[in-house]
Amino acid sequence: MQAPIAFYREQGTGPGVVCLHSNASSSSQWRGLMELLAPSFRVIAADSYGAGKSPAWPVGRTLVLRDEVDLLEPAFAAAGDPFVLVGHSYGAGIALRAAVTQPQRVRALALYEPTLFALVDAQRPPPNDADGIKAAVARAGEALDRGDEDAAARHFIDFWMGEGAWAATPEARKPPIAAAVRNVRGWAHALVNEPTPLAHLAELDIPVLLMTGSRSPASGPAPARLLRGALRRCEWVAFDGLGHMGPITHPEPVNGAIAAFLARL
């Protein structure tokens, strides 16, 4: 049986940059960044399992980040070695997993609030800053069990973007987001049970840009704070007034910081 292959879009020429999106999103979230970087880089934005035009998550299998890395292999190959990985939230978690498993291929990382909640639990057992997202996932999962996808999406989106965010989402955009949130328990399993410890991430000897937003719920920046203290070559940017979904809600400052970071490599 042929291995599943991720869909990816590409633009520009030059050194490779691969962009990985957040949960309940798709590669389209990086269109602005692709246009910004295309004059100097070959920019590839890929869809993870169950997102955009990539395959749905196989029935009966538990999602893990290594599976996402394997799915993205064609995108990595198209970028050419070594490439830069840009990631947001879940995509940033995938990027870190890829960098640890294939360090010779990754030139640098630019990450906005990677959601490797396993790092938080390993540092301090619950109760801790990961409790908020775990509770939101539990509420979303209960809604899915009732067959209420709208409520599941509301629990998930409102946690990250603030109460009322789902209600304010344009109706045309809701169906693909609600469909993606069906995988919420799989996302949580992958992030809470990721087996890569902080000590292994600390061995990465590449430049890393870590970005956070001041308005994120506590769960958002918690893994990044741990990574900041552990990574060898880490640059930190904290955006005042931005939340966890900053790369989508306020792409200009985030994309600008990424472009400036790449220009310094």
Image: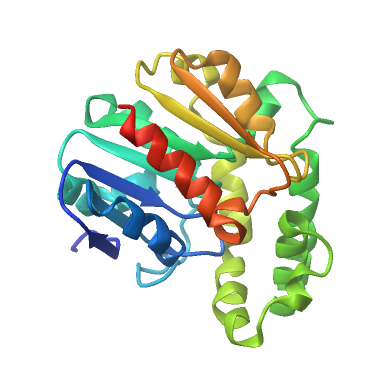
Q: Is residue 107 left or right of residue 176?
A: left
Q: Nearer the viewer, residue 139 or 59?
A: 139
Is 166 situated above or below 200? Answer: below
- Is residue 187 something that shows in the picture? yes
**Who's the residue at 37% across and 50% down the image?**
19
Point out residue 232 in the picture as x, y percentages from the top left corner: 45, 12
Please identify the residue farthest to the bottom as the structure is shown. Answer: 172
Quarter where residue 184 is shown = bottom right
**Who's the residue at 29% across and 61% down the image?**
6
Point out residue 170 in the picture as x, y percentages from the top left corner: 66, 82
Q: How is the image coloured?
A: rainbow
**Who's the residue at 62% across and 49% down the image?**
188
Q: Is residue 204 left or right of residue 184?
A: left
Quarter where residue 5 is shown = bottom left
Is 111 situated above or below 43? Answer: above
Count the labels in the image: 0
